[in-house]
Image: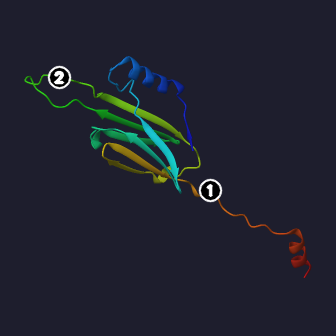
Amino acid sequence: MLMRTDPFRELDRFAQQVLGAASPGTWSKPATMPMDAYRAGGEFVVSFDLPGVDPDAIEVDIERNVLTVKAERRPLPGGDDVQMQVSERPLGVFSRQLFLGDTLDTDHIAAGYEAGVLTLRIPVAEKAKPRRIAITGANRDRKEIQA
C-alpha cells in the first residue's frame, strides 16, 4: 500500500527534537509533519498533524502515484508593540511525500481538514479487493461437451 523511501527523515526529526533545533522549514528544505496511515475496510486512510495551519496554506498533489502534501504555518500577525515571551511552535514549511502502490484508486482521493488534522481517504482499487474465484471441475466440463 505505502512505501517509505527516506530513512533519514525520521533521524532528522529525532535530532531536531533531542537537540532542540528549531530551524523553520523552507520551500527548499521543508520540515517533516507527523502522520498516521492505516487501512479501514475498503479504503486507505492517512492523517497528517497540521495544527495552526490555515486550510488555504495546504497543498495536496498527486503525480504517478506519488502523493505530496505541503503546508505552511505562518507567524501570527504582530507589530512593533508585540514582544514574544515564548516561541516553541515551529513555523515555516512542512512537507511529506508518500509513494502509493498500484492497489489504490488515486483518482478518487477525498481530503478533509478538521481540528488541525488533514485526513486523506484513498479507496482500494477494485482489482486489489479480495474476490472469490469459481472453480470448474474437469469431469463436469467433459460431460457437458459430450452431451
Relative to 19, say whether 75 is above or below.
below
Q: Which residue is at 51% across, 23% downward?
A: 8
Based on the displayed image, in which of its 4 quarters is residue 117 positioned? Answer: top left
Which is more N-terminal, label 1 or label 2?
Answer: 2
Q: Secondary structure at mark 2?
A: loop
Residue at the extreme bottom: 147
From the viewer's perspective, tell me whether residue 8 is left or right of residue 144. left
Tell me the amino acid under the disc marked 1: Lys
Location of mark 2 (residue): 85
From the viewer's perspective, tell me whether residue 142 is left or right of residue 51. right
Relative to 94, say whether 58 is above or below.
below
Q: Secondary structure at mark 1?
A: helix
Residue 21 pos. (x, y %): 35, 18
Location of mark 1 (residue): 127
The N terminus sits in image quarter: top right
The C terminus sits in image quarter: bottom right
What's the image's color scheme? Answer: rainbow
